[in-house]
Amino acid sequence: MTSSPGPGARSVVVAGGAGAVGAMLADLWRGDGDTVHVLDARAGDDIRFPEREAEVRLREADVVVLAVPEDVALEAMKSVSPLLRPTALLVETLSVKSRFSSAVAELAGDGDRGGPIAGINPMFAPSLGLSGRTVAAVVHRDGAGADRLLDDLARWGARVKITTADRHDHVCAAVQTLTHATVLAFGHALADLGVDADEAAAMATPPFMTMSALLARITGGTPEVYRDVQASNPSAPAAREALARAVSRVSAASAGDTEDFVELLTEAGGPLGGYADEYARLCARMFGGL
């Protein structure tokens, strides 16, 4: 999808603009005709302690994006927020929202500008492109700037899912933490089994090829990104504990009779809800391409 320019050019500052998410957003706003200023630690910028030129950019900005790690974002919010105009939008791109949301609540008080603050989480690798993909959005504090951000995302072709910080983290523990932990556990189980990679590839089934492809993508990715998924989400330990219980459940059902295994399959398919047929068709298309 080709986006059409949004109404009225803006001044946008992207901290972490050399990273994958920051660069994607910077390019999208540039495509709208907005003026984008990139600050990045690799160029010597520290958004937690903005120097004079950066401070001028922040004071003039309509939108300020914190595409930085959580610890940096939490600290930067305290120093950046007082510099912004009351109407300026502050945006975070964290994979965990609840701690930032709590920090926003703590801002309330004397001297707080009270401006809009939002959070987005692209549920995909930015290299895949935004059009047609899901972006989770949390409005920490509403305002016209937050509304326009949601409009921007939709206009750029994203499927925007608006949620709360707590629900975001709970669901992401399932769709990210649990998924990645399952794939990584698959890799370590392969290592424990000691199966030769050439033999496995020669006899690979479509499900094995799919899992191996996921394993290759994750293990070939940026360690900090995948560690953040496992370490930062407050619901992550519960997700991994659920995975461990599930493996034990499979072992127990396998030691039982056919009825036990039928019950296992029924229970396992339950969370798919009304999407079971849709996912089954997707799987068929994927396997057809292998």
Image (cartoon, helix red, strand yellow):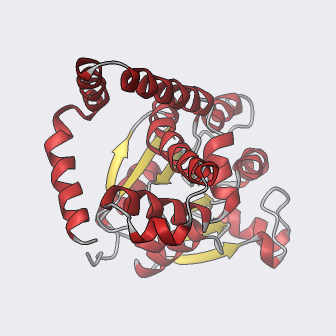
Residue shown at 60% from the left, 60% from the top: 65
The x and y percentages for residue 117 are: 55, 45
Q: Is residue 50 above or below residue 202?
A: above
Residue shown at 71% from the left, 54% from the top: 69
Image check: 277 left or right of 50? Answer: left
The x and y percentages for residue 2 are: 28, 78
The x and y percentages for residue 204 are: 38, 64
Q: Quadrant of the C terminus?
A: bottom left
Specify the quadrant of the image occupied by residue 211. bottom left
State the residue in front, 285 or 173.
Answer: 285
Does residue 143 appear anywhere in the picture?
A: no
Image check: 145 left or right of 159? Answer: right
Residue shown at 79% from the left, 46% from the top: 75
Q: Quadrant of the N terminus?
A: bottom left
State the residue in front, 196 or 4.
Answer: 196
Residue shown at 62% from the left, 54% from the top: 191
Image check: 170 left or right of 163? Answer: right
State the residue in front, 219 or 247.
Answer: 247
User: Total marks drawn?
Assistant: 0
Does residue 8 appear anywhere in the picture?
A: yes
Q: Is residue 175 above or below residue 35?
A: above
Specify the quadrant of the image occupied by residue 148. bottom left
The x and y percentages for residue 209 are: 39, 63
